[in-house]
Image: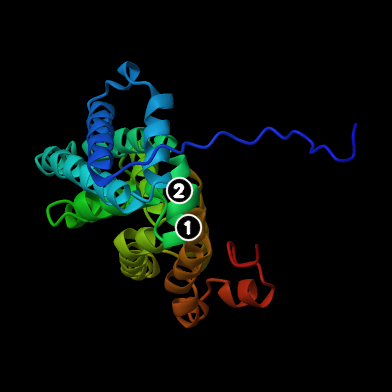
Amino acid sequence: MDAGRKKFVVKPFRNNIGMDVNKAKETWQSLRSAIGEIHGHNASLLSFEELYRNSYNMVLHKHGDMLYSGVVECITEHLVQMADRVIKATDDTLMTQLFAAWTDHTITMTMIRDILMYMDRTYVSQKRKMLIYDMGLVLFLESIARHPQVKDRLKWHLLANIDLERNGELIDRGVMKDILGMLVDLGVRSNSVYEEDFENEFLSTTAAFYNAEAQRLLDQNTCPDFMEKADRRLTEEHHRVMQYLNSSTELKLKAIVERELIANHAKALVDMEGSGCVAMFRDDKVAGTSG
């Protein structure tokens, strides 16, 4: 090749056609309508390639603010309507209705996120805003999970179910796992929501439950029988973590049960006449405390 000739390079396509505010508003209205179809479960009618291209062009031509704020507004409006259905749920159906709303929300947010991938990669990082899927989690938390007519009812049902199960009743562990998993996800890569909206009070009520349980068992059992029942309770709580509680709860829960059932009553157990507890503690044979 002649050294004086320049090498031919194929440059990536760039859309040099400008987009003024009026065109941006028109494009946004098209995207807004599409998001409405997604929320209405009509996504099969849409061209996701075209929608991605439209959102790409809006960001490319510096209309990211309009796009981001518009999407947040759309999602919020939809969640307000969804919240109305959840708050009207009866006590028997609250958790199933809430989880149905959550499932629907996560599916539609995944579709919306796919349309807005370019915005997430560029505009969101440049402007230090939340990724649109994460923003959807925050909006669901504010509009539904922490709605004044949902938050406390939900916590009460979760705690009431655990109380029933501790007293031998059968509960729907599947829906417990679903709802507690939702609370974890709503923390956006932290357990803050799970802890604030469930775990803190769960641990507090657990301490009260086992304090009362210990008093009852001390009145009715010898030391070996007491320790056997305490060990059974520790096993039950371990299974509870395995079945529906978040794994981050296990060590806190185990410490509370051991403290309330055993450690706080060690002297009373040792003082039981003829119970054999002195030897059990001396030889570290107390069930549930050496493993």
Q: Secondary structure at mark 1?
A: helix
Tag shown at residue 143? none
Q: Is residue 72 above or below residue 223?
A: above
Where does residue 145 sit, x and y in percent of width and height? 24, 51
Q: Quadrant of the C terminus?
A: bottom right
Where does residue 5 sit, x and y in percent of width and height? 82, 37
Q: Quadrant of the N terminus?
A: top right
Asked if one can make out residue 44 in the rendered structure from this viewpoint, the answer is yes
Characterize the local packing of mark 2: few (<14), some (14-19) or many (20 or more) Cα atoms within 10 angstroms.
many
Where does residue 235 sit, x and y in percent of width and height? 52, 53
Of the pair 190 and 258, the residue shown nearer to us: 190
Where does residue 189 sit, x and y in percent of width and height? 47, 56
According to the image, label 1 marks what residue? Answer: 125
Q: Is residue 12 above or below residue 142?
A: above
Cα distance between the residues tagged 1 and 2: 7 Å
Tag shown at residue 120? 2
Q: How is the image coloured?
A: rainbow
Label 1 amino acid? Ser
Characterize the local packing of mark 1: few (<14), some (14-19) or many (20 or more) Cα atoms within 10 angstroms.
few
The structure residue drawn at horizontal position 27% and vertical position 23%, both measured from the top left corner, is: 41
Label 2 amino acid? Asp
Q: Are marks 1 and 2 in contact (CB under 8 Å)?
A: yes
Say whether residue 151 is left or right of residue 213: left
Numbered label tally: 2
Of the pair 36 and 170, the residue shown nearer to us: 36
Residue found at the far front of this picture: 4
The structure residue drawn at horizontal position 17% and vertical position 54%, both measured from the top left corner, is: 147
Quarter-of-image position of residue 18: top left
Of the pair 18 and 114, the residue shown nearer to us: 18
Asked if one can make out residue 189 in the rendered structure from this viewpoint, the answer is no
